[in-house]
Amino acid sequence: TINLIVLVDAALTRAAMVNAIITATEAKTATLTEMAILTPAGAFATGTSTDTVTVATTGLGAPHAYAGPATVPGWLIAKAVRQVVRDSLLAE
């Protein structure tokens, strides 16, 4: 199971919070693929049936309307998720 808690030190609209979940999930999946993590059937793993992503914000500043990987908050989310997933898998 891969449980991610993403804390954003900014304000995000509700739509951007959903976007942040998508960005975090994409980053997790990309990392699993890059690390060649496979399912028991030999396919590339994209996660497990019990993975979760929680996004919380501090609400500071003007709200960001988007949090995809081409935005500043999204890029930072993706970078952090990729690093933490990679570090976690290497520690096993």
Image: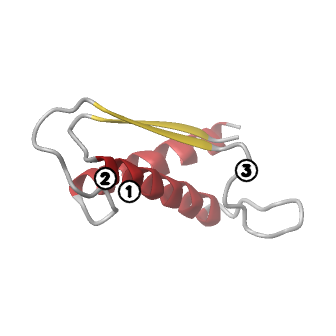
In the rendered structure, the answer to whether residue 53 lies left or right of residue 73 reads right
Task: Name the residue tied to disc 3.
Answer: 48
- Distance between mark 1 and mark 2 Cα atoms: 5 Å
How many labels sit on residues? 3
Check contact, mark 1 vs mark 2: CB within 8 A. yes
Amino acid type for the residue under numbered disc 2: Ala
Mark 2 nearby-residue class (10 Å; few <14, some 14–19, many ≥20): some
Along the polypeptide, which appears first: circle 3 or circle 2? 2
Check contact, mark 3 vs mark 1: CB within 8 A. no
- Distance between mark 3 and mark 2 Cα atoms: 24 Å
Task: Name the residue tied to disc 1.
Answer: 19
Amino acid type for the residue under numbered disc 1: Asn
- Distance between mark 3 and mark 1 Cα atoms: 20 Å
Using the rendered view, name the quadrant where residue 71 is placed: bottom left
Task: Name the residue tied to disc 2.
Answer: 16
Q: Is residue 78 visible?
A: no
Q: Foreground mark, 3 or 2?
A: 2
Q: What residue is drawn where x is 52% and y is 55%?
A: 25
